[in-house]
Amino acid sequence: MGKFNLSHRVVLAPLTRSRSYNNVPQPHTILYYSQRASNGALLISEATGVSETAQGYPNTPGIWTKEQVEAWKPIVDAVHAKGATFFCQLWHVGRMFDSAGKTPVSSTDKILTPKIGDDGTVISQFIQPRRLRREEIPDIVNHFRLAARNAIEAGFDGVEMQGANGYLLEQFMKDKVNDRTDEYGGSLENRCRFVLEVVEAVVNEIGGERVGIKLSPFSELGECGESNPKECVHSLEPMRKAFNDGHNYGEWSSSMRLSLSAKSKLGLIDGTVKVSLAADSRFP
Ligand SMILES: Cc1cc2nc3c(=O)[nH]c(=O)nc-3n(C[C@H](O)[C@H](O)[C@H](O)COP(=O)(O)O)c2cc1C
């Protein structure tokens, strides 16, 4: 995979564990990841917050403080000692947030409907999000950039942006959520603008060969859907232009989770970016 020598195509998917107390990875995480590492393997870490405002679930790790970076170091070392490659998944939950104490930010001020269990009880009651102001967006882009730098400082081989499953990046991309009227909403190009700015900033910081993004164009998780699912393939159009990978998305099957090598056509990206797609039952 690019400059990384992998011995097989079985990848550890990013799996949230909620065991990083106070958002700091704990020493027991060394055992968890080293048990899953082997020579020539690729591991992607659990989703890891890029800033305090990016967090939405209790005890998920972050990578915006010195303490967090230092805590990741022995974990990454243990994975490397087994001969594996380790990418850190960077996320911002946006409006997918159900704890009191702060106002989540999003592309929108539309609140998620509460999650109701089979017995009719409310499992999650979401908090009213606040639509990011135009002038706040560069700060969030910068948080991804700094988090990517921190990930490299912690020893990770690269980062994967969480652009799937209803979180902030997807809240900008999908038209059932993004109701903005500025240059970050409306057309597909506009809805992909924030994500491409994040990708560009991160690539400029750590190099394209170390950067990936996870997308779930057909998923409706977190009420992040496209109004015309039949045209979902086209939701990747700006990404395709940016990454110039020339792949025929229509041929992908439902069980695929792909990493593609891609280069910039728009001049945004200097190097190779990996794009992985979350499998989804609504894949054509
Ligand atoms: C417990 C659990 C935690 C997960 N946490 C994350 C996560 O932190 N980041 C992420 O991108 N996906 C997460 N996922 C989704 C998985 O990475 C994966 O996409 C999903 O299980 C489907 O696997 P597949 O795409 O390989 O078929 C999680 C899934 C489970 C079951």
Image (cartoon, rainbow, N blue to C red):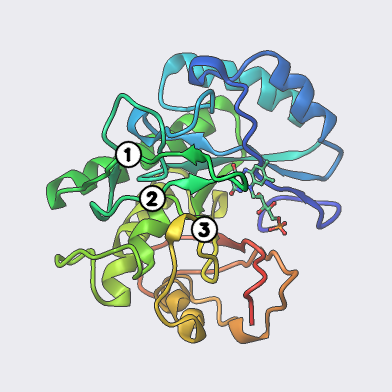
Answer with mark 1 or mark 3, whichever residue precedes in sequence: 1
- Amino acid found under the numbered disc labelled 1: Ile
Separation of marks 1 and 3 at Cα, in angstroms = 17 Å
**What is the number of callouts on the image?**
3
Question: Residue at (14%, 52%) from the top-left corner?
Answer: 134
**Mark in the foreground, 1 or 3:** 1
Helix, strand or loop at mark 2: helix
Answer with mark 2 or mark 1, whichever residue precedes in sequence: 1
Residue hosting label 3: 221
Neighbour tally class for label 1: few under 14, some 14-19, many 20 plus, Cα within 10 Å: many
Separation of marks 3 and 2 at Cα, in angstroms = 12 Å
Question: Residue at (67%, 65%) from the top-left corner?
Answer: 279
Horizontally, residue 77 falls left or right of residue 261, namely right
Q: Residue furthest front?
A: 119
- Amino acid found under the numbered disc labelled 2: Leu
Residue hosting label 2: 168
Residue 62: image x %, image y %?
48, 27
In the image, residue 20 sits, relative to residue 241, either above or below, namely above
